[in-house]
Image (cartoon, grey):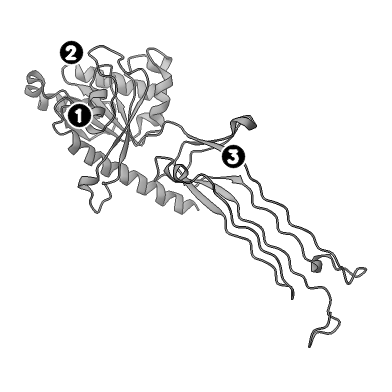
C-alpha cells in the first residue's frame, strides 16, 4: 500500500459493525400488548461495512419494544411452542433476536509472520424467528368480594364489559376484564388513562386451601396493582364478610394483603342499606384498623344505579397512576 506520509503502509481494512438486536423490555406503565398488535415485523439495524484507513463500522442500535409486566414469550407452535421467557419486573429485558456479528477486515489478521494478509472474515447473520407473545391476566384493578357482592354488576356499570349477572352465588366462574375510560375527566395528574379492571370470581372462607374456586383465581389478584374490595351492604353481616376476605388474602400471601386497597360499600340503592350507610362505613373502618390492614380508603356506592361509581373510578385512577409513577422512578434508579 502506498500512502503519503505513511512509511511501509500495511493492511488497514476496518472491521464491520454488529447488527442491532430486537429486545423486549418490561414497562410497568403499560397494560396491553398494543405495540405488538399494530406492528408484526420488528428488525434491528443492519451492520455496516468497515472501510480503509482502519475505519471500523459502529454497532447498530438495538430495537427495544416495551411490553407490560406479565408478558410471556413462546416459540411459534411449528417450532414446539416452548416458553422462551417471561417479563415480570420493571426494566427486565429479554433478547428475542440477536443481531449479527460484524466481520473482520484484513488489518485484524496481520502479524509479524503475515504482514500483508489478503483476506477478510465475513460477518455472521443475525437471528430471526416467529414468536408468540401472550399477556397473563394483568389488570390495574382487581374486584374482590364474596359471591353476589355485585362485582359483575359494578364492572358492567363502569365499563363496556358484559359479564354474566344473576342472583345466585358463583355466577362468575372465569375472570372478566373491562376497560374503564376516564378520558372525559383527564387532568394534569394523568388520571385520563384507561384502567383495566378484572372481575375475580367470588372468594369464600377457605379459598387459600382451594375451597370454592380457590387458589386459581387468587393468583390473578397478585398481578393487580390495586384491589377494589366490594362489600355487600345488604348481607347479614357485611363486616364479617370483609374480615373473611382480608383473612383469605393474608393466608394466601402476606404480600397480597399489603397491596393498596379501596373498600366499597355496595348496594346503597337499597333503603335498608342507605339508612345504615354511615354506621357500616364506621364499622368497616374500625375492622380494618383493628386488623392492622392499613386501609383508609372507604366509599359507598351503588353498582346497580351507578351512584358514585365513576367518581370512585376517577379516584382509583389517580391511585393507580401514582403507583405506576413510583414503579417507573424505581426502575430508572435501578438502571
Give the side of residue 223 with respect to residue 286, left or right.
Answer: right
- Counting from the top left corner in percent of width and height, residue 132 is at 54, 35
Q: Is residue 3 above or below residue 61?
A: below
First in sequence: mark 1 vs mark 2: 2
The residue lying at 66 percent from left, 58 percent from top is 18
Quarter location, residue 210: top left
Residue that protrudes farthest toward the bottom in the picture? 5
Q: Earlier in the sequence, mark 3 or mark 2?
A: 3
Q: Is residue 253 visible?
A: no
Residue that mark 3 sits on: 130
The crowding category of the residue bearing disc 3, from other C-alpha atoms within 10 Å (few below 14, some 14 to 19, many at least 20), is some
Left or right of 95 on screen, residue 2: right
**At x 13% / y 31%, what residue is drawn?**
307
Give neighbour class at mark 2: few <14, some 14-19, many 20+ (Cα, 10 Å).
few
Nearer to us of marks 1 and 2 is 2
Q: Which mark is first along the chain, 3 or 1? A: 3
For the residues labelled 1 and 2, the Cα–Cα distance comes to 18 Å
Secondary element type, mark 2: loop
- Residue at image mark 1: 285
Count of picture labels: 3
Q: Which residue is mark 2?
A: 236
Query: How far apart, in angstroms, are the residues tagged by discs 1 and 3?
Result: 52 Å
Amino acid at each position: 500500500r502506498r500512502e503519503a506520509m505513511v512509511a511501509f503502509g500495511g493492511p488497514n481494512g476496518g472491521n464491520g459493525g454488529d447488527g442491532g438486536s430486537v429486545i423486549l423490555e418490561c414497562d410497568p406503565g403499560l397494560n396491553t400488548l398494543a405495540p405488538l398488535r399494530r406492528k408484526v415485523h420488528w428488525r434491528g439495524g443492519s451492520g455496516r461495512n468497515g472501510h480503509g484507513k482502519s475505519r471500523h463500522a459502529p454497532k447498530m442500535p438495538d430495537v427495544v419494544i416495551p411490553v407490560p409486566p406479565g408478558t410471556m414469550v413462546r416459540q411459534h407452535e411449528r417450532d414446539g411452542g416452548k416458553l422462551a421467557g417471561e417479563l415480570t419486573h420493571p426494566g427486565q429485558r429479554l433478547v428475542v433476536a440477536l443481531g449479527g456479528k460484524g466481520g473482520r477486515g484484513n488489518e485484524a489478521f496481520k502479524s509479524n509472520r503475515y504482514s500483508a494478509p489478503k483476506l477478510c472474515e465475513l460477518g455472521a447473520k443475525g437471528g430471526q424467528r416467529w414468536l408468540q407473545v401472550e399477556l397473563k391476566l394483568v389488570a390495574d384493578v382487581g374486584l374482590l368480594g364474596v359471591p353476589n357482592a355485585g362485582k359483575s354488576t359494578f364492572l358492567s356499570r363502569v365499563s363496556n364489559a358484559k359479564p354474566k349477572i344473576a342472583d345466585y352465588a358463583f355466577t362468575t366462574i372465569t375472570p372478566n376484564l373491562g376497560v374503564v375510560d376516564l378520558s372525559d375527566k383527564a387532568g394534569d395528574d394523568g388520571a385520563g388513562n384507561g384502567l383495566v379492571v378484572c372481575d375475580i370470581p367470588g372468594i369464600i372462607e377457605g379459598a387459600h386451601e382451594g375451597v370454592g374456586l380457590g387458589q386459581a383465581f387468587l393468583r390473578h389478584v397478585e398481578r393487580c396493582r390495586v384491589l377494589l374490595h366490594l362489600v355487600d351492604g345488604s348481607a347479614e353481616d357485611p363486616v364479617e364478610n370483609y374480615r373473611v376476605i382480608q383473612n383469605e388474602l393474608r393466608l394466601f400471601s402476606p404480600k397480597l394483603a399489603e397491596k393498596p386497597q379501596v373498600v366499597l360499600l355496595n348496594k346503597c340503592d337499597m333503603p335498608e342499606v342507605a339508612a345504615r350507610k354511615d354506621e357500616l362505613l364506621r364499622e368497616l373502618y374500625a375492622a380494618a384498623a383493628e386488623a392492622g390492614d392499613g386501609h383508609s380508603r372507604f366509599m359507598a356506592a351503588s353498582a346497580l344505579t351507578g351512584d358514585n361509581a365513576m367518581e370512585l373510578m376517577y379516584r382509583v385512577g389517580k391511585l393507580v397512576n401514582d403507583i405506576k409513577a413510583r414503579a417507573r422512578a424505581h426502575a430508572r434508579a435501578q438502571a
